[in-house]
Image (cartoon, grey):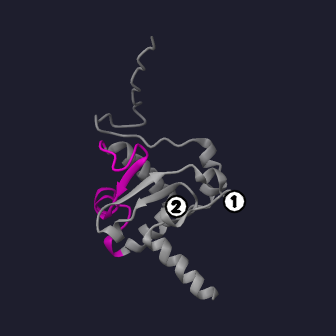
Amino acid sequence: MGRRKKEYTKQSYESTGISWDTSANIYISMLQSKAWAELTAKQQVLYLYCKAQRYAEKKKPSGDLSFTMNRSKWCDLYGLYTVANNRMFYRDMAALIGRGFIICLECGAITRTKSVYAFSDMWQNYGTDRFVIPPDHMTKYMLNEVKKQKEKGA
């Protein structure tokens, strides 16, 4: 018979101790990866907020690795971007997807609902021939950028 795991006790330097507080752990292998190194500081912070959001959501929208991120969260709740600067959010989220950290399961811009994202381990293949981001894992913003690049090259 297995033992029940003891719940982790937050240290005083990690949290104020409030009961609903969540964590956003990150490992050194990710910090030292080429994909992480190519992110801007703001994009890295956005990733940490995405992890915190995943753990904060009690009801997962589309599986255990999924989470939602909409304007009320990245603008009002977290204060990462302003409404006037919403293009930066979409650009930064596209960078996380483009480096293989996150995938877009449901693009809210298309369905007029909350965007649903999930975490991915594709970042481990970044810079190799095994690294692929399928179009169905991209946001509308990313698909528009791909279309613009193709039109420039044509």
Seen from the viewer's position, the closer of residues 63 and 152 is 63
Seen from the viewer's position, the closer of residues 84 and 105 is 105
The residue that disc 2 covers is 97
Whether 23 is among the magenta residues is no
Work out whether 14 lies above or below 113.
above
Q: Quadrant of residue 84?
A: bottom left
Work out whether 118 lies above or below 16.
below
Q: Quadrant of residue 57?
A: top left
Q: Tag 2: residue type?
A: Ile
Left or right of residue 43: residue 11: left
Residue at image position (60%, 47%) is: 30
Q: Tag 1: residue type?
A: Gly
Return the x and y of residue 47 as percentages of the image width and height. 47, 54
Q: Which numbered dot is residue 75?
A: none
Return the x and y of residue 124 as percentages of the image width and height. 63, 50
The residue that disc 1 covers is 127
Q: Residues within 10 Å of mark 1 (few under 14, many from 20)?
A: few
Q: Which residues are magenta?
A: 58-84
As measured in the structure, the alpha-carbon distance from the residue carrying label 1 to the one carrying label 2 is 14 Å
Give the mark nearest the N terminus, 1 or 2: 2
SS at mark 1? loop
Return the x and y of residue 118 as percentages of the image width and height. 45, 52
Return the x and y of residue 105 as percentages of the image width and height. 42, 58
Work out whether 107 lies above or below 148.
above
Seen from the viewer's position, the closer of residues 7 and 130 is 130
Residue at image position (60%, 55%) is: 36
Q: Quadrant of residue 29?
A: top right
Labelled pair 1, 2 in contact (Cβ < 8 Å)? no
Quarter of the N terminus within the rendering = top left
Exactly how many numbered labels are in the figure? 2
Residue at image position (54%, 83%) is: 148
Residue at image position (34%, 66%) is: 108
